[in-house]
Amino acid sequence: MPLGANYLEALRRYADYERQYSADVAAKIHEATTFEHVAKRYLKEVLPKKAPRTQRDNLNELKKLFEFFNAPAPAPLNEIRPLHIRQYLDWRAKDGGVVRANREVSLFSHIFNYAREWGYTDRENPCRGVKKNKETGRDVYVSDKVFWAVYGKAERHIQFVMLVAYLIGQRVADCLKIKVSDIHDDELWIVQNKVNAKVRIKIEGLLAEVLAQLLVERGTVIHDYLFINLGRVRHAGQPLSYEMLRGGMDRARAAARIDKQQFQFRDLRAKAATDKDEQLGIEAARTLLGHSNQMMTADYIRNRKGKLVAPTVVKIKVSNAI
């Protein structure tokens, strides 16, 4: 491009061309930077660092996010506003995904924050200030009758994991990852996935008996995982996976004629905490669960069974009252 013979005028014209070029390029980058583009980078760089179960959940959540934010075309990241997050929550509510929508929006928010760090946008996170769907936590307490009914119909490896999970009060993932090498000097050492809290549980009483029997029946498998498939199928001897546990629980519930809403494996953590609170107090329940304070524990168990209380003491004769 000829800029003329005058040096200063040539510089001015060059600056004008440069500004115009930069504005055009910036507009193209702005348009090309979609939520899908950033999410795919998130999949490559961030997702692999998460726990396996979280990775599976995030992949399912992204399917729904892509379904909304790619229709009819990929949404430019800088054009997404709080209004669109609200529309997403309402859209998911129509197909019954009220609770899942909250998890999906949380993932969107996490991806958007990474987009800010990576320099794709300097806009405020559109999820900020958007009220999520109201959730009601599970308030199911698994009675001893229901527990033993399902236990009686469960396969042997499911029985072992049911008993241990109830006795130690840990999350599903933390139970399945336990290894034989986590047993040290009559203690079971656990590092919780969710909060990285460390818990040591004394191996005594029924827990000691169950673990001793489990180790006998476990035999000499080559891996270190404590819970294995003890069935006579092609999975025999393999570490007990989440899918194996879910299938085993489904079969046991069906055989015992117990509805899934009455008893899910994750309810054993709440049952353990509730029973521990009733036996030894909330502090004992807190330390078992690995919570940082009693308020978390109280909120976790308060609606499960109801606090056991004594009736009012009245100093009158029974004969006069009835």
Image (tube, helix red, strand yellow):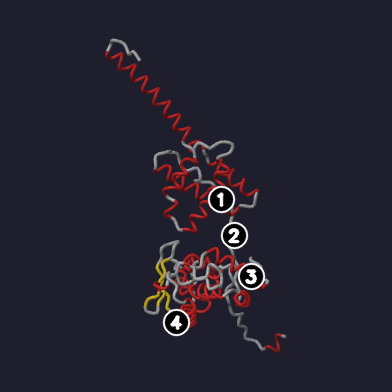
Residue located beneath label 3 in the image = 253
Query: What amino acid is found at the position of numbered circle 3 in the picture?
Result: Arg
- State the separation of the CA atoms marked 4 and 3: 29 Å
Image disc number at residue 132:
1
Q: Nearer the viewer, residue 133 or 33?
A: 33
Residue located beneath label 2 in the image = 136
Query: What amino acid is found at the position of numbered circle 2 in the picture?
Result: Thr
Q: Are marks 4 and 2 in contact (CB under 8 Å)?
A: no
Q: Residues within 10 Å of mark 3 (few under 14, many from 20)?
A: many
- State the separation of the CA atoms marked 4 and 2: 36 Å
Residue located beneath label 4 in the image = 204
Query: What amino acid is found at the position of numbered circle 4 in the picture?
Result: Glu
Please, what secondary structure does the residue beneath circle 3 have? helix
Q: Are marks 2 and 1 in contact (CB under 8 Å)?
A: no
Could you tell me which residue is drawn at 43 percent across and 79 percent down?
203
- State the separation of the CA atoms marked 1 and 3: 33 Å
Q: Earlier in the sequence, mark 1 or mark 3?
A: 1
